Amino acid sequence: MAPVQKKKKIIKKRNKEPVVEEVKEEEDLEPKKEEEEAEVSDKEDMDEAEMKEEEEDDDMETEEFEDPEQKQKKTGVVYFSMIPPKYNVVRIREYFEKRCPGQVGRIFLARNKHTKNPQYKYSEGWMELKKKKIAKAIAGQIDNTPIGGKNKDSVSSMLWNIRYLSGFKWVHLMEQLQYEKEVEKRRMNVEVAQARRIAAHFEEQIDKGKHLRKLEAKVKASGGKWDAFQRDVEQKKTIRVKKKRSKQVKTESSELMNMIFK
């Protein structure tokens, strides 16, 4: 009877084993489903983020690749006939950014060639604004008004002198500056060439003088005569021109004057 009982025990163990495996398989499937759902949701989020980034990139591209001619037509340029002392590009930008934020473009200040004082470094300037209306408004409102600032500052009592340049664009300013640079460059080249010609002629005359002195020394050493070079300059005779006196016409008034001043 003993071996029969052992067989029954073995059968019970075999029946229990698959049940445990099935439970484990079900437990393993649940986290896998959760992981797949999380992956799907992450992919959807990534796709949405990529779509948004592409849309933003397209918007940026349209802004960047906007026709430059149309941009230029919208802009306006303002001219400063006088730059206040101690003012530079940064300070002017800060001043006008307070009055029209985000509308100030490029600024160019011309150097003052007539003085070496660092306070009066710039003599005139130009400022570009993104819209014509704003440029006209600034020129009308700020022109002939005090600069302002601290009372101790000497600049505070000075007045702005601003003009709106109708039909004038930043390209015109760059062309004018480039033209002036070319003219200055050519003028300098002409002056340098002339100075070199004068220096070369001077050196040539010095070499000739040295050569003549050597020849003079040789002739005198050999007992010969050396005639010093003298220029024969003929002076023109002065010509005297006799001025013809105008004939006096006798009139009643002349006769009266002669009677008085005899």
Image (cartoon, helix red, strand yellow):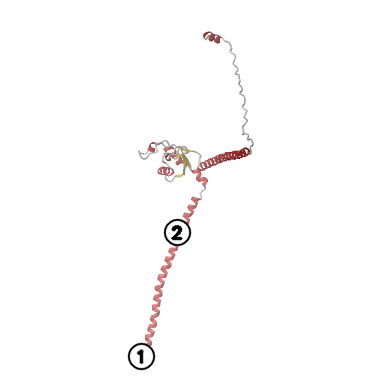
**Quick check: 53 left or right of 248?**
left
Measuring 50% from the left and 44% from the top, which residue is drawn there? 72
For the residues labelled 2 and 1, say whether their Cβ atoms are less than 8 Å apart. no
Q: Earlier in the sequence, mark 2 or mark 1?
A: 1
> Residue 24 appears at what percent x and percent y?
39, 75
Foreground residue among 136 and 113: 113
Which amino acid type is marked by label 1?
A: Ala
Foreground residue among 257 and 85: 257
Task: Tell me the crowding category of disc 1: few under 14, some 14 to 19, or many 20 or more residues within 10 angstroms, Cα based.
Answer: few
Which residue carries the number 2 mark? 49
Question: Which residue of the protein is positioned furthest toward the top in this rendering?
Answer: 259
Measuring 38% from the left and 37% from the top, which residue is drawn there? 154
Question: Which residue of the protein is positioned furthest toward the front in this rendering?
Answer: 223
Foreground residue among 243 and 187: 243
Q: Which mark is residue 2?
A: 1
| Nearer mark to the viewer, of 2 and 1 | 2
**SS class of the residue under badge 2?**
helix
- The quadrant of the picture occupied by the N terminus is bottom left
Q: Quadrant of residue 19?
A: bottom left
